[in-house]
Image: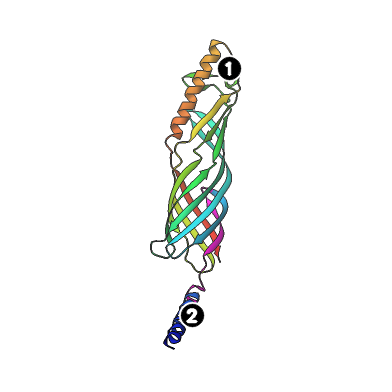
Amino acid sequence: MQWMVRTAACVAAMTSAGTALAQSTAGEGRVSLGVTAGTLGVGPEVGYRFNQQVGVRANGGFLGIDHSFTSDGIDYRGHAKLSSGGVIVDVYPFGGGFRLSAGARYNGNEARVRATPTGATQIGDRVYTPTEIGTITGRADVREFVPQLTLGYGGGLRKGLSFHIEAGALFQGAVRIRDFTSNGTLAADQTIAGDTYRTELGKQRRKLQDRADDYPVYPILQVGLKYRF
């Protein structure tokens, strides 16, 4: 008889604990879906928060940007294509919305540059005419898989719509300048003059590369909206 009483008491205790747990988590949302926008581009984000302290997210960013700049007296027109996706682990040290995040990102970002001089222009250490130079084109890319670190606010566990923001860095290394060529009269010239021009164009590429080497870290600033279920 005693074992029946003890069993009934255990069942009652477990039922009571389960009801209390269900009531305590009734307003909590573990899964979130949303959109994020910023220096990584614009894209979707999905997340899962295991508890008050730990969560995980996956997101993507896509965007095309036109940008003009001058380097060593040459005016370039650039077009950057942002295309990346990452998986991030979030730690909420205080159990609220403030978070510290670390993750890995596939970085498909790339850029193309183009310059068409309209007057005598120095290429490397020599000066050439617009006809001799033609149009200069080049391509820039970065390492494909890179780490990222951010801190920000991701909202709590309450179900519904919330705002989030984060800032940090993408450690992509130096941008690599590739396929730096031109289509002027000296580009394919097989004489000494052509060889000299191609050497000077190589020097010009290295000058542009030296400038790119100064920016091995790409800044992250993202804002977004998400709905937690």
Q: Is residue 200 above or below residue 83?
A: above
Q: Position of residue 151 (x, y in %)?
A: 42, 55
> Residue 38 magenta-drawn?
yes
First in residue order: circle 2 vs circle 1? 2
Residue 180 can be seen in this image = yes
Q: What colour scheme does the image use?
A: rainbow
Residue in front for this viewpoint, 99 or 189: 99
Residue depicted at x 46% and y 34%: 212
SS for callout 1: loop
Q: Position of residue 41 (x, y in %)?
A: 55, 48
Q: What range is drawn magenta here?
A: 23-40
Disc tally is: 2
Picture disc at residue 15: 2
Q: Is residue 15 above or below residue 90?
A: below
Q: Is residue 149 above or below residue 92?
A: above
Is disc 2 surrounded by few (<14), some (14 to 19) or many (20+) residues within 10 Å? few
Alpha-carbon span between mark 2 and mark 1: 85 Å
Residue in front for this viewpoint, 14 or 208: 14
Residue depicted at x 48% and y 77%: 18
Q: Amino acid at mark 2?
A: Thr
Q: Nearer the viewer, mark 2 or mark 1?
A: 2
> Residue 30 magenta-drawn?
yes
Residue in front for this viewpoint, 221 or 176: 176
Decide if residue 115 is on the left or right side of residue 96. Answer: right
Picture disc at residue 186: 1
In which quadrant is the N terminus drawn?
bottom left
Q: Amino acid at mark 1?
A: Leu
In which quadrant is the C terminus drawn?
bottom right
Residue 122 can be seen in this image = no
Q: Position of residue 225 (x, y in %)?
A: 54, 60
